[in-house]
Amino acid sequence: MKTFTYTIKDELGIHARPAGMLAKTAKALDSEITIACGEKSAAATKLMALMGMGIKCGDTITVTINGGDETASEKAMQEFFKANL
């Protein structure tokens, strides 16, 4: 299991467009990815659950990668967040 934290820089937070891109990216990986913020958490592949978390600019999230090729999945998720959020 690998984890990393990321502070959201997108001024709108995780809204529909980046949530959809995040879910699509997570589905393409062979690891189970979970996003947590405060008391809430959701599978990265679940678009509506991600949007329902209400993650805003400045919030720090924890990304957990479990199973499959964790190293490659972690790198892909870090690159996604830096490029899109």
Image (cartoon, rainbow, N blue to C red):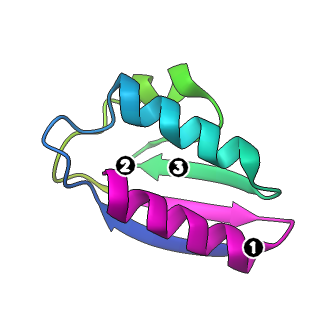
Residue to which mark 1 is pinned: 70
Q: Residue shown at 82%/72% (left/top)?
A: 69
Residue to which mark 3 is pinned: 35
Q: Nearer the viewer, mark 1 or mark 2?
A: 1
Relative to 64, is 81 on the left or the right? left
Label 1 or label 3, whichever comes before in sequence order: 3
Q: Position of residue 35 (x, y in %)?
A: 52, 49
Dot 3: what SS? strand
Q: Position of residue 40 (x, y in %)?
A: 46, 39
**CA distance for labels 2 and 3:** 10 Å
Quarter that holds the N terminus: bottom right
**CA distance for labels 1 and 2:** 23 Å
When the figure is inspected, residue 31 is found, relative to residue 53, above or below; the finding is below
Outermost residue on the bottom side: it is 71
Q: Is residue 74 magenta?
A: yes
Q: Residue shown at 87%/66% (left/top)?
A: 68
* Number of the label disc, if any, that sits on residue 38: 2
User: How many neighbours does mark 2 have within 10 angstroms: few (below 14), some (14-19), or many (20 or more)?
Assistant: few
Dot 1: what SS? helix
Label 1 or label 2, whichever comes before in sequence order: 2
Relative to 82, is 63 on the left or the right? right
**Amino acid at the residue labelled 3:** Ile
Q: Which residues are magenta?
A: 61-85
When the figure is inspected, residue 83 is found, relative to residue 51, above or below; the finding is below
**Amino acid at the residue labelled 1:** Glu
